[in-house]
Image (spheres, grey):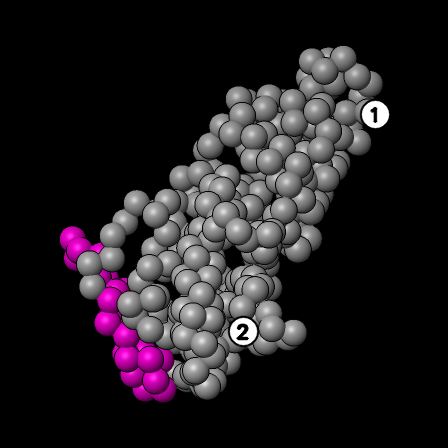
Amino acid sequence: MDTTRQPEHAPTKNVTKVERKSDREIVVERSFDAPVHLVFEAWSKPELFKRWWVPKSMGMTLRACEMDVRTGGGYRLDFGDGMEFFGRYLEVTPPSRIVWTNEEGGENGSITTVTLTETDGKTLLVVSELFASKEALDADGGGASDALRETFGQLDDLVVELVSTS
Amino acid sequence: MVQYSSTQLDACLAALSDSTRRGVLEQLGRSEASISDLADRFHITLTGMRKHVGVLEQAGLVVTEKVGRVRTCRIGAGRLDEVSDWVERYHQLWDARFGELDQVIEELQQKEKSDGHNKTT
């Protein structure tokens, strides 16, 4: 598994939880040791957003990042070679909520909802991605059907890793 | 620590926590087999193998079909793959993002401190 480098002074790494809520929805949860207005800032300012949205381990570079972060505004992330992600902000309520569409795949793209809640100076971040159908969610997984034929040796490694880390 | 709440994944993990059952999966990954074939190969009783196959079947990892007197087992249609591979991939992406987001936020906090809390929020 990819282990992400942490700032040296960070005491502990907060846990990223992923839960498949239903056939159509997947939810990610993570706490940040910072007040909500700072977390919101990192999500809503393009110059900050583009520093973390595409992690180095993805091996991709964001060529352009246009974000008009307000209700009704649009965004466009350009990775070059014709690879683009774009959509509209359905709702932007600083500093607690951002909802956007993902339209690069056509009209039935998923809807992403980010919710930020501050408690005792820490911020709980919840990202929900709701797909139009189970098929759309599965397709977004990318290559899931190829992996059907993955060797059980690899499967074993994965399981050992999951068991030892849970 | 990784946390998955998927009950499907829990069932898969429980099924895979046993080395005999993992061996059975490996075997079935190569070719389908009857319960008695598997019992012979793993040197356990028919009853014992039926139990193991039952657990794998409940987790969706194996499907069985009775033809005449023989129950044939084969790998299930990839439910583990469907659940864990997708979720695992998604988890890796977001965990990597959040690792870098931590650094951005840390910088913002430092900056805010050095600005002497002049900013109002």
**Residue tagged by mark 1?**
B47
Snapshot quadrant of residue A69? bottom left
Secondary structure under the numbered disc 2 in the rendered image: loop
Residue A14 quadrant: bottom right
Comparing A130 with A67, the one in front is A67
Amino acid type at mark 2:
Pro
Q: Do the CB atoms of the residues marked 1 and 2 lie less than 8 Å apart?
A: no
Q: Is residue A43 magenta?
A: no
Magenta span: A65-89
Residue nearest the viewer, comparing A59 with B52: A59
Q: Quadrant of the C terminus of chain A?
A: top right
Of labels 1 and 2, the one closer to you = 2
Is residue A81 magenta-colored?
Answer: yes
> Residue under circle 2?
A35
Residue pictured at 51% horizontal, 29% vertical:
A154
Host chain of mark 1: B
Q: Position of residue B6 (x, y in %)?
A: 64, 54
Q: In the image, residue B98 lies at what x, y percent?
A: 47, 57
Mark 1 to mark 2 CA distance (whole Å): 58 Å
**Residue B48 visible, this angle:** yes
User: Is A25 displayed left or right of A90 in the figure?
Assistant: right
Neighbour class for label 2 at 10 Å: few (<14), some, many (≥20)? some
- Say above or below: B59 vs A18: above
- The answer to whether residue A41 is left or right of residue A85 is right
